[in-house]
Amino acid sequence: MSSEPPGDAESLLSAFARWAAGTRVRDEAAGRARQRWLHQQASEAATLAGTLLDLAEGRAAVTILSAQRRYSGHLVGVGADLCVLEEPGRVTVVGLSRVIAVQPQPTPATARPAAASGNRAIEMVMTFQGALSAMAMDLAPVRIALVGTEILIGDLMGAGEDVVTLRVPGTPPRPAYLPVAAIEAFSPR
C-alpha cells in the first residue's frame, strides 16, 4: 500500500511527460540548428571545382554554360582548372575560367537533378594547358572552341606555356597560333 495521496503519482507522471516532451522538442530544435550550421559551413567552403567533383562522382548529366555556348553531357572528370564532359561520340574539355553556370539535369530514375556541396579539394593535378599538351604529343585532330563564337578544326601540333599550334586545313595546310587563354574548350575529332 502506498503512502502517497492518490493523484500525486499521476501528477508526477504528468510532470515527467511534460519535461520529456520539452526535452525532445529542444533536442530536435538543436539538431535542426546543427544541421543548418553544418550546411552553412559546407556552403561557405564550396568551390566550383569541388561542386563539379561532387557531380562528376555520380556521372551527373549537366549543361555547362559559357558566355557564348552550351556544353551538355555527363560530367566525368575535374582537374585543377578544367572539367571533362562525355557526350555520345564526343569528349569535351572545358576550361573552368570560361564556365558561367552549371545546371545539373534530372535523372530518369529520380526526376531530380543531382545535389552537390562543393566543399572539397581537387586532387587531380591535370590542368587545361596540360591536357592540351598531352593531346599535342599525338598530333591529335581537334575541334577548338575559342572565346567568342569562333571554332577551329585542325591537328594539334604543339602546346607551349601559353600558346598552342594548330595546323588548319588549306592549300597548303597552315599553322594557327592560339593563346591558351583564348581557348574555351576543345575535343578530339
Image: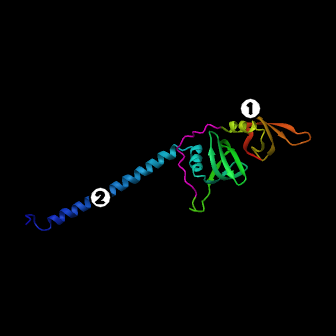
Q: Position of residue 145 (x, y in %)?
A: 76, 45
How packed is label 1: few (under 14 Cα within 10 Å), some, or many (20 or more)?
Answer: some
Q: Residues within 10 Å of mark 2 (few under 14, many from 20)?
A: few
Q: Is residue 90 left or right of residue 60?
A: right
Q: Residue at x 74, y 41 (%)?
A: 183
- Which quadrant would the N terminus be assigned to in this image? bottom left
Q: Nearer the viewer, residue 150 or 83?
A: 83
Q: Is residue 116 one of those drawn in magenta?
A: yes
Q: Which residue is mark 2?
A: 22
- Sequence-first tag of 1 and 2: 2
Check disc 1 and report the residue beneath it. 160
Where residue 141 sits, quadrant-wise, is top right
Q: Specify the farthest residue to the top.
A: 161
- Locate residue 84, reporting x and y percent: 66, 46
Front tag of 1 and 2 = 1
Amino acid type at circle 1 is Gly
Number of marks in picture: 2
Quarter assignment of residue 80? top right
* Magenta span contains residue 136: no
User: Which element is circle 1 on?
Assistant: loop
Q: Who's the residue at 37% across and 55% down the image?
A: 29
Determine the residue positioned at 26% across, 61% down. 18
> Which residue appears at 67% of the width and 49% of the height?
85
Left or right: 50 in relation to 20: right
Amino acid identity at mark 2: Gly
- Give the magenta part as a residue range: 113-126
